[in-house]
Image (spheres, helix red, strand yellow):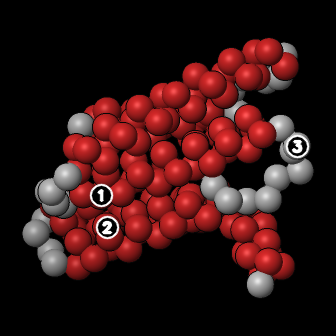
């Protein structure tokens, strides 16, 4: 069972950008249909945002070669807060209750995660901007625009 989980998470992380763009495309189509009052739009929005939230949730528990507890915790915090933010975005678009609470929790956790990641990279003199930092900035900006 442990090997099965490890294989799934490895496949998700190796194809993460493809998965993100696929679900982004489905989301945009769903949003256009939803805006034109076509019923299938709601289903596409739920399917795309729910699926990408599940991908991020699974990636929060990926196996790390790092022995640093702080880095492992930061990875979990980042992906779980992205998951909460995406579900909050979905709730907000569909006008479901408690969207603002999820957006607020996800936003604060993402900001803490972003600042901690930047500080950690500055201390280690690593490249500051990479795909994970960019992903956090994009999700933070979308949450702020939806909120």
Asked if labels 2 and 1 touch by Cβ distance under 8 angstroms, the answer is yes
Question: Residue 101 location, x and y as percent?
Answer: 25, 44
**Image quadrant in which the N terminus is located:** bottom right
Residue 38 in which image quadrant: bottom left
Residue labelled with disc 1: 90
Mark 2 and mark 3: Cα distance apart in space: 38 Å
Residue 33 in which image quadrant: bottom left
Q: For mark 3, give the secondary structure.
A: loop
From the viewer's perspective, is the residue at label 1 or at label 2 nearer?
A: 1
Does 70 sit left or right of 29 as displayed?
right
Residue labelled with disc 2: 45
Question: Residue 145 location, x and y as percent?
Answer: 28, 35
**Image quadrant in which the C terminus is located:** top left
Residue labelled with disc 3: 67
Is 46 placed above or below 59 here? Answer: below
Question: Residue 64 location, x and y as percent?
Answer: 82, 52
Mark 1 and mark 3: Cα distance apart in space: 35 Å
Q: For mark 2, give the secondary structure.
A: helix
Q: Is residue 142 visible?
A: no
């Amino acid at each position: 069972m442990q090997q099965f989980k490890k294989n799934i998470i490895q496949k998700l992380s190796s194809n993460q950008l493809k998965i993100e763009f696929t679900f982004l495309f489905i989301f945009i189509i769903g949003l256009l249909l939803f805006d034109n009052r076509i019923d299938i739009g709601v289903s596409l929005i739920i399917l795309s945002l729910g699926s990408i939230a599940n991908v991020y949730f699974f990636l929060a528990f990926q196996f790390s070669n790092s022995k640093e507890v702080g880095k492992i915790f930061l990875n979990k915090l980042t992906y779980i807060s992205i998951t909460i933010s995406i579900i909050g975005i979905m709730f907000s678009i569909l006008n479901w209750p408690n969207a603002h609470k999820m957006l607020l929790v996800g936003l604060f956790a993402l900001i803490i995660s972003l600042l901690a990641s930047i500080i950690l990279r500055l201390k280690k003199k690593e490249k500051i901007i990479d795909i994970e930092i960019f992903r956090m900035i994009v999700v933070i900006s979308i949450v702020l625009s939806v909120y």
